Amino acid sequence: MGTCQSDKRPYNPNDYVDKRPYRLRSGDMSKPLLDDPKDGTLFRKDYGEGLKEFPEFMGGLIDDYKRRYPHFVSDFKDALSRKTLSSSLMMFLATFCSTVALGSIASRHTNGHIGLSEYLLMNGVAGMIHALVGCQPLIILRPTGPITLMLAQIYSLSLLLGLNFFTLLAWTGFGVAIWSTLITGFELSRHIAMLTCFAHDVFAVFVSSIYVVDGMTAVIGRLMGSSADYAAPLFAFTIAAALIFISFALSNLRKTPNLFSKYARFLMADYALPLATFLATLLSFFASGTVDVERIKMSDTIEPTLADRSWTVPMFAEGWLAAFFTGIAISIPIAIFFYFDQNFSSLLSQTKEMGLSKGSYYHSSFAWTGVFNFVGPIFGMPFVTGSLPHSPQMVQALTKDPDTKNPDAPAVDENRVAPFLMYFLILISYLSSTGRHVIESIPVSAADGVLIVVGLEGIFATRLWRRLPVLVTPDSECSPEFGDPWAARKFTLLQLSVLAAGWILNFTPLALAFPLVIACLVPIHAYVLPAVFTDEQFATLDGERDHFDAKDNLKSYSAA
């Protein structure tokens, strides 16, 4: 996922110049976080490209479009690459299957008020618009797992207060739009650069784990819910397990030099998830005559999930004033979450190690999510935000295979066609009867497997995952990559504690407040970590590479 990689060599104190604890490790790595060590200021006006404060309102948004405009033509020319189709298909399956699963979960948790129809429409329409006019089209916008949890909590709150769910949702979207406008107008997204690997990993694992939990809950739930006939749930388990195994096996072909040609290995790795889904679906038909296989169900018509509901929402229905004030109030923690989710998605997709060459952009995508989250709920649609781990995975899917002949060529085939095609496939799968029939052939258990794969890939890409063995490994056998073993253990346990707090709060009546746990990462990073770790330990555990260098990987790939 591109999060916070580290050079695998022992820490050398001479490599670390600025040893003050408050140091910027995202954005411009050469500038300290404190403007003046004496004034105690934790905020900068300039964190680097795309993360600057401007004197005029919406100056950052205007700057985003000024910097991206010269690349607009090349955004379409650069689509002439085999990576465009493979990335579109891979991310279509990853996004579509998780959207289908989350739409089904939303339908259950809201008693059928919002579900698959709204999720697919919002995902497709909002995504296509952003792919065409957003400054960073590779950011994946969609209804995510946390958004599904929010919708469930909003529905429960509407029942508790006796309010119309859709009216409350619409006014909540209005509140979110207000906060999004202010955040964009004052370039507050730039402060996301304050957070480093500690926060990146915690947030990435938290969001990715939601997909794993959703997928595993569905797979295990079938087994636990079957009192007599275990054939169907066991076969469903087999389908999900086969998809997971095939997907990871094909993805790892890049690291298997003695099997097939290099081009064939890389091609199969590019299409790992689509191929795994196809083979899992094929497997499901072998026993469909003797075992009942549950497949994805889609509506035969284009209509809302809730019967007899019109697409427009009665914003001024009875009790709208209470819905207005309630919506504005609950939009605050929701906007806080969107601030972190959207900006983390942008940050982790645009780190130097990701190899993007057309600039970094934050304000435009955040502004567009504000527009979508205002307009969508007016029609009973879910919110959208930048998606982890899908956004960095989109960049990785478009990353070129290292070229030994031209190592200085752009590392990523950045274009607008790949994400647009992905969203178009999502939308047409809902609008087209043929598309619906193709999608309805996919087993539900395969969709669960896709959720698990996407979530695990996001977790495996973090340093937190790589550092977990330190907790049970003797000091003498610990990797020097993470420096002092005891410091690495404390660092890891702190991250796990924040993760646990987020999940615990998620299961309480205060679930809508879980974004506040994410917000606590700011003071934890600014005050707790420097007090617990020395400067050298902090640099080793929380540092990241200053730049992306494609040459670093050429030797291993050219030898393959």
Image (tube, helix red, strand yellow):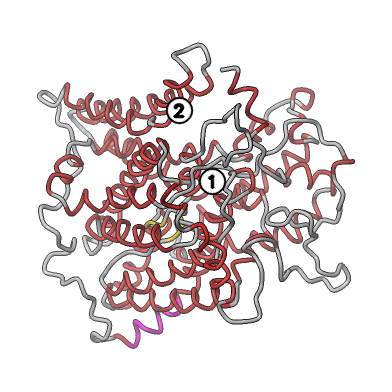
Q: What residue does disc 2 label? A: 251
Residue 103 vertical position relative to residue 213 in the rendered view, above or below: below
Dividing the picture into quarters, in which one does residue 22 lie? bottom right
Q: Compare marks 1 and 2 and give the one earlier in the sequence.
A: 1
Of 17 and 298, nearer the camera is 17
Circle 2 — which element?
A: helix
Image point (89%, 41%), residue name: 14
Tell me the magenta residue range. 321-329
- Are dots 1 and 2 in contact, CB under 8 Å? no
Q: Position of residue 6 (x, y in %)?
A: 70, 38
Bin the neighbour count of mark 1 within 10 Å (Cα to Cα): few under 14, some 14-19, many 20 and up: many
Left or right, 470 with respect to 180, comes to: right
**Quadrant holding the C terminus:** top right
Label 1 vs label 2, nearer the camera: 2
Dominant secondary structure of the magenta stretch? helix
Circle 1 — which element?
A: helix
Q: What residue does disc 1 label? A: 205
Q: Position of residue 104 (x, y in %)?
A: 26, 51
Residue 350 vertical position relative to residue 42 in the rendered view, above or below: above
